[in-house]
Image (cartoon, rainbow, N blue to C red):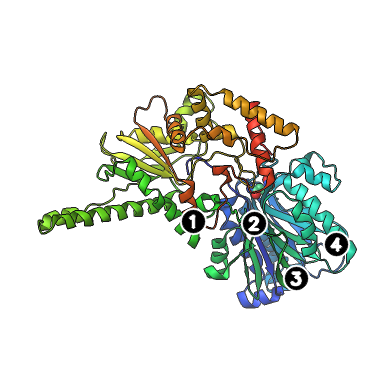
């Protein structure tokens, strides 16, 4: 991955179904749940770099004693920071009573986070700021236990303002900036109503059925209620991922299946997908149900989860990434004129590595077909040496690019900064035959193209290949995301800039103004959600034209090595990742009405020179 696409958030939910003494007996520790939560979060640390948080609820607590706790951190290593504090409490206690960990009751009384209900979160902000105040879980306290709520999720909502209006709340400055704050108010509003209606027996599914349809966005959200009930729900299109596992001991939910598998050591089919629109509800007594909260709509699960966000250790995701690379083989063979002898294949570390193996397989299959054809065409006319030579032909793969330094902010002076930026990546010398070999490098996506231009292309050109081909295992990113990925500004996308350049080249700049006027007209009549005007920016051009323009844009002016860029097609993406058909960032087809509004607003912001998000 050369361009960091801002990562997703990750959710980790654990509900212990037995008393703490049981875990002490069976697993040797009362801290079983917290240990598992720690692992479940660590195994998903790919999903959030801004911060993390944990909330916990204790069951059956004497009135007057605290039962809901929450800890958050936006430190450098937020997960470690949180758990060192949680475990610090245990160490402190052990100083006074060395065998305290053998006493479940005492532990539960003294360790704030030793609750049966645990909710962990990893954040990459898509709204508000990257501060600890914005880290999840958010909590709301009340003297009535059933009206206490902790919430955390992987989501983005595009109707935050409307939500406050709907429940008649005038948000403060902080709340205005946070979709989680809006979600909290809405769910809490219905939680209070539900508690009023039947004190002592909350209808969790019922209250979610009232609250959740009001949210426009993609979401997987977990919640703990002070009365001991808890839930996880998912949007109707299944945009954000959600998985769960139920055993006699625990109920677990998380954003990634492989994380649950690893932490609980269970098989692929033991971990279930929480289907679109469903809610996983665990009552205070431990009963679990999966209920329909929203009528499921057309499945549009985010394909970027498969291309890049989720960990490639997942059984299915691994195979899909292999297929993504494999599917690119034909386009690449055409680009190198089937000249495998003079082509070297490599990848941009690290996330593109699996797709690279797929590409390698694709090339190998082709080479094998060629070998068989050639050998058959010889008839009886061959020697051992000739046969050996033919069989020894291999795809040439090398580790060419190396991820090196993280740019340090202390370099501020422009010229040295540019010089330094180059060195974010390094190259392996002696791998390429000068002016003879074509270098094919696969990356998982190209968003802004900045790192390619500033570092990778410059570095690769130092090896003097005949040509550089950059292959993207994702299609062209043309439209903003508004469902949890922080890529919301059109002017940032190299594909968008390429289309604008092409318009300029062809004297069609007026087209942009026309599209802008169209947006303004739609905005005036409150119709911004009805169509995606930005599709008109790309319409006059073929994908190849845009790819060629991107190649020009990412080639630094002083580099004379020809550069070509090849993208995955949308069809082959869907062939490779059949269950995750969400592709709005590539096609502009948004699953929810807010999507069109966001893309049109993003375009208006671009035209007006405003560097803000479209939601
Ligand atoms: N990436 C995410 O899921 C972000 C969650 C939420 N929108 C936030 O900014 O906190």
Q: Earlier in the sequence, mark 1 or mark 2?
A: 2
Q: Secondary structure at mark 3?
A: helix
Spatial CA distance of label 4 from label 3 is 34 Å
Residue 306, image x and y in percent?
Answer: 52, 53
Q: Identify residue for label 1.
A: 312
Spatial CA distance of label 2 from label 4 is 26 Å
Spatial CA distance of label 2 from label 3 is 29 Å
User: Are the residues flagged by discs 4 and 3 in contact, CB closer than 8 Å?
Assistant: no
Task: Place residue 386 in its image quadrant.
Answer: bottom left
222 on left or right of 557: right
Residue 51, image x and y in percent?
Answer: 64, 48
Q: Earlier in the sequence, mark 2 or mark 3?
A: 2
User: Are the residues flagged by discs 4 and 1 in contact, CB closer than 8 Å?
Assistant: no
**Which numbered disc, 4 or 3, marks the residue closer to the eye?**
4
Q: Secondary structure at mark 1?
A: loop
- Mark 1 neighbour class, 10 Å CA radius: few under 14, some 14 to 19, many 20 or more: many
Q: Identify residue for label 4.
A: 194
Q: Residue at x 29, y 34 (%)?
A: 466
Q: Earlier in the sequence, mark 4 or mark 1?
A: 4
- Camera-side residue of 113 and 175: 175
Spatial CA distance of label 1 from label 2 is 18 Å
């Amino acid at each position: 991955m050369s361009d960091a696409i801002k990562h997703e958030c990750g959710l980790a939910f654990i509900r212990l179904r037995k008393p703490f003494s049981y875990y002490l007996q069976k697993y040797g520790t009362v801290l079983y749940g917290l240990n598992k939560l720690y692992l479940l979060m660590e195994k998903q640390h790919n999903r959030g770099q801004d911060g993390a948080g944990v909330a916990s609820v204790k069951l059956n607590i004497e009135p007057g004693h605290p039962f809901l706790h929450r800890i958050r951190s936006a430190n450098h290593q937020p997960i470690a920071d949180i758990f060192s504090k949680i475990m610090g409490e245990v160490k402190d206690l052990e100083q006074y009573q060395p065998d305290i960990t053998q006493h479940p009751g005492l532990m539960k009384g003294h360790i704030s986070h030793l609750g049966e209900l645990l909710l962990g979160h990893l954040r990459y902000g898509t709204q508000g700021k990257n501060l600890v105040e914005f880290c999840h879980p958010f909590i709301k306290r009340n003297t009535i236990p059933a009206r206490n709520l902790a919430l955390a999720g992987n989501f983005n909502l595009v109707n935050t303002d409307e939500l406050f209006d709907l429940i008649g709340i005038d948000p403060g400055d902080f709340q205005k900036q946070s979709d989680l704050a809006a979600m909290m108010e809405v769910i809490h509003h219905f939680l209070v109503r539900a508690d009023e209606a039947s004190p002592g027996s909350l209808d969790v599914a019922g209250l979610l059925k009232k609250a959740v349809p009001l949210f426009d966005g993609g979401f997987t959200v977990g919640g703990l209620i002070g009365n001991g009930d808890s839930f996880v729900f998912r949007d109707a299109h299944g945009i954000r991922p959600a998985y769960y596992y139920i055993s006699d001991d625990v109920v677990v939910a998380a954003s990634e299946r492989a994380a649950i598998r690893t932490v609980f050591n269970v098989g692929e089919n033991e971990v279930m997908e929480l289907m679109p629109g469903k809610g996983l509800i665990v009552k205070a007594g431990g009963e679990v149900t999966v209920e329909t909260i929203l009528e499921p709509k057309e499945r549009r699960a985010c394909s970027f989860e498969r291309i890049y966000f989720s960990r490639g250790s997942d059984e299915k995701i691994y195979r899909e990434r292999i297929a993504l690379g494999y599917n690119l083989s034909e386009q690449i063979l055409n680009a190198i004129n089937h000249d495998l002898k003079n082509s070297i294949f490599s990848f941009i570390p690290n996330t593109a590595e699996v797709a690279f193996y797929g590409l390698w397989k694709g090339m190998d299959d082709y080479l094998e077909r060629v070998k068989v054809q050639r050998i058959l065409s010889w008839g009886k006319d061959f020697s051992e040496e000739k046969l050996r030579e033919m069989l020894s032909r291999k795809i040439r793969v090398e580790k060419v690019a190396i991820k090196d330094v993280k740019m340090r902010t202390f370099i501020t002076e422009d010229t040295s900064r540019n010089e330094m930026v180059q060195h974010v990546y390094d190259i392996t010398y002696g791998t390429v035959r000068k002016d003879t070999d074509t270098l094919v490098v696969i990356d998982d996506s190209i968003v802004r193209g900045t790192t390619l231009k500033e570092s990778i292309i410059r570095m690769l050109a130092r090896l003097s290949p005949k040509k550089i081909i950059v292959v993207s295992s994702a299609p062209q990113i043309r439209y903003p995301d508004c469902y949890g990925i922080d890529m919301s500004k059109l002017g940032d996308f190299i594909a968008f800039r390429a289309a604008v350049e092409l318009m300029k080249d062809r004297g069609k700049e007026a087209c942009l103004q026309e599209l802008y006027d169209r947006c303004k007209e739609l905005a005036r009549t409150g119709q911004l959600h009805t169509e995606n005007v930005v599709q008109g920016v790309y319409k006059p051009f073929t994908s190849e034209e845009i790819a060629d323009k991107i190649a020009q844009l990412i080639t630094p002016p002083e580099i004379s090595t020809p550069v070509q860029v090849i993208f995955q097609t949308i069809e082959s993406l869907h062939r490779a990742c059949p269950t995750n058909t969400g592709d709005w960032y590539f096609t502009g087809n948004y699953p929810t009405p807010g999507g069109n509004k966001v893309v049109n607003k993003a375009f208006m912001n671009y035209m007006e020179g405003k560097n803000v998000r479209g939601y």
